[in-house]
C-alpha cells in the first residue's frame, strides 16, 4: 500500500472544514476504484485559530482515524503550517491544499496520475483567471510575478497555488530548507524537480472569509523578493553610482554658473528640493539594506519555525 498524506493548513476555518472533508469523500472513492493500493491520511494544522477550529478537527478525528492534527501555540503563519504538516506527513506522496475549496479536490486524481504514472516529481496547480478577486489585488499580483521573475534566479509561475502533490523525495528536499522566513512557492522552484502544471479557473471560497488582506499580501510579496533575490541590493549600489555622478555634474554646474554670473544665492528652492529628494532616497536605500540585515539577524537567532501546543 502507498500512503497519500493531505496537509491542510487552517486558520479560523471552523465553518469550512466539515464541507472540505465531505468534498474529499467522493475523491477518496475515485481513488479506491482507480488506485486501490493507495491509502489516505489527513493532517490538519491549526495555526493558532480562535474560533474553535481545533475542536472541529478533533471531532473529525474521533469519527475517522485517518485524520491527524497539529495545533500551534499561537499563529505562526501559513508557511509554518505547511512546513509542520509536511514534517508530520508519513505518506509516499504529500498533498498541500487549502480547506476553503478554492483548491478543487476533483483535480487531485489527475495530479496523482502525473506523479504516479507519468514520472513527474510533483504536480501543481495555477489559476488561469482571477475572477472574483478585487481588480487592484489582481493587478498587483501580476506585477509581482513580472518583477520577481526578472530579478530572481528561480521561476515563479503566475497564478500558482500552494495546491500541489509531491513525491517523498521532493518533500524531503523541501524540508531540508529550514529557514524561518519562508516563501514556499519559491522553495518549490528552488529545489527543482520535474513539475506538471494543471490549470483551472478561479474558484470562490466555500464558506468563511479570506484571511489575506491587501497589505498582508503586499508584505508577503516583499518576503518573497527578499528571500529569493539580492537584486534590490544591486540596484541600491547602481543607484548610488548614478546619484554620485549626477551630484558631481550638479556641483560643476553650480561652480561654473557662479563664476560666470556671480549669483551664488539664486536657486535655493530647487536646491532644497534636491536635498530633500536625496535624503529620501538615502532613507529608502538604508531601509532596503536594513530589511536584508533584519532577515539575517532573525535567521541567526535560530528560533523554531513553529511551537506545537498539542497533536495527534
Image (cartoon, grey):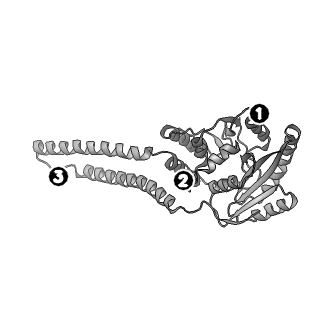
The image position of residue 66, as x and y in percent, is: 83, 55
Q: In the image, residue 230 lies at what x, y percent?
A: 45, 46
The furthest residue to the top = 118
Mark 1 or mark 2: whose residue is earlier in sequence: 1
Q: Marks 2 and 3, how far apart in space?
A: 45 Å
Mark 1 Cα-neighbour bin, 10 Å: few <14, some 14–19, many ≥20: few
Q: Residue 117 — which label?
A: 1
- Mark identifier at residue 206: none
Residue 237 sits in quarter? top left
Nearest the viewer among 96 and 131 is 96
Near mark 3 (Cα within 10 A), the count class, few <14, some 14-19 or many ≥20, is few
* Number of the front mark, 1 or 3: 1
Label drawn at residue 219: 2
Residue 265: which disc? 3
Number of marks: 3
Residue drawn 70% across the image and 45% down it = 168
Please report the residue visible at 63 percent of the width from the left and 58 percent of the height from the top. 77
**Residue 254 at x, y = what percent?**
18, 45
Q: CA distance from mark 1 to mark 2?
A: 39 Å
Q: Secondary structure at mark 2?
A: helix
- Tell whether 110 sits left or right of 303: right
Q: Quadrant of the C terminus?
A: bottom right
Amino acid at each position: 500500500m502507498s500512503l497519500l498524506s493531505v496537509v491542510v493548513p487552517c486558520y479560523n476555518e471552523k465553518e469550512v472544514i466539515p464541507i472540505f472533508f465531505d468534498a474529499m469523500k467522493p475523491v477518496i472513492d475515485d481513488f479506491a476504484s482507480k488506485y486501490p493500493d493507495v491509502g489516505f491520511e489527513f493532517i490538519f494544522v491549526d495555526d493558532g485559530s480562535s474560533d474553535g477550529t481545533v475542536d472541529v478537527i478533533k471531532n473529525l478525528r474521533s469519527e475517522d482515524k485517518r485524520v491527524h492534527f497539529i495545533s500551534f501555540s499561537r499563529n505562526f503563519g501559513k508557511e509554518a503550517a505547511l512546513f509542520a504538516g509536511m514534517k508530520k506527513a508519513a505518506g509516499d506522496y504529500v498533498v498541500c491544499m487549502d480547506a476553503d475549496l478554492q483548491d478543487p479536490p476533483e483535480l487531485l486524481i489527475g495530479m496523482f496520475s502525473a506523479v504516479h504514472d507519468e514520472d513527474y516529481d510533483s504536480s501543481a496547480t495555477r489559476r488561469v483567471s482571477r475572477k472574483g478577486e478585487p481588480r487592484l489585488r489582481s493587478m498587483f499580483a501580476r506585477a509581482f510575478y513580472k518583477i520577481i521573475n526578472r530579478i530572481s534566479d528561480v521561476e515563479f509561475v503566475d497564478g500558482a497555488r500552494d495546491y500541489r502533490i509531491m513525491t517523498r523525495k521532493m518533500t524531503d528536499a523541501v524540508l531540508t530548507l529550514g529557514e524561518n522566513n519562508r516563501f514556499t512557492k519559491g522553495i518549490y522552484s528552488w529545489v527543482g524537480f520535474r513539475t506538471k502544471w494543471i490549470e483551472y479557473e478561479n474558484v470562490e471560497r466555500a464558506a468563511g472569509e479570506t484571511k489575506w488582506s491587501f497589505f498582508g499580501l503586499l508584505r508577503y510579496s516583499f518576503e518573497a523578493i527578499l528571500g529569493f533575490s539580492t537584486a534590490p541590493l544591486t540596484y541600491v549600489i547602481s543607484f548610488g553610482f548614478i546619484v554620485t555622478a549626477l551630484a558631481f555634474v550638479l556641483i560643476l554646474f553650480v561652480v561654473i554658473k557662479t563664476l560666470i554670473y556671480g549669483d551664488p544665492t539664486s536657486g535655493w528652492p530647487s536646491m532644497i528640493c534636491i536635498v530633500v529628494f536625496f535624503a529620501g532616497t538615502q532613507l529608502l536605500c538604508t531601509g532596503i539594506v536594513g530589511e536584508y540585515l533584519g532577515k539575517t539577524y532573525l535567521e541567526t537567532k535560530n528560533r523554531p519555525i513553529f511551537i506545537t501546543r498539542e497533536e495527534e
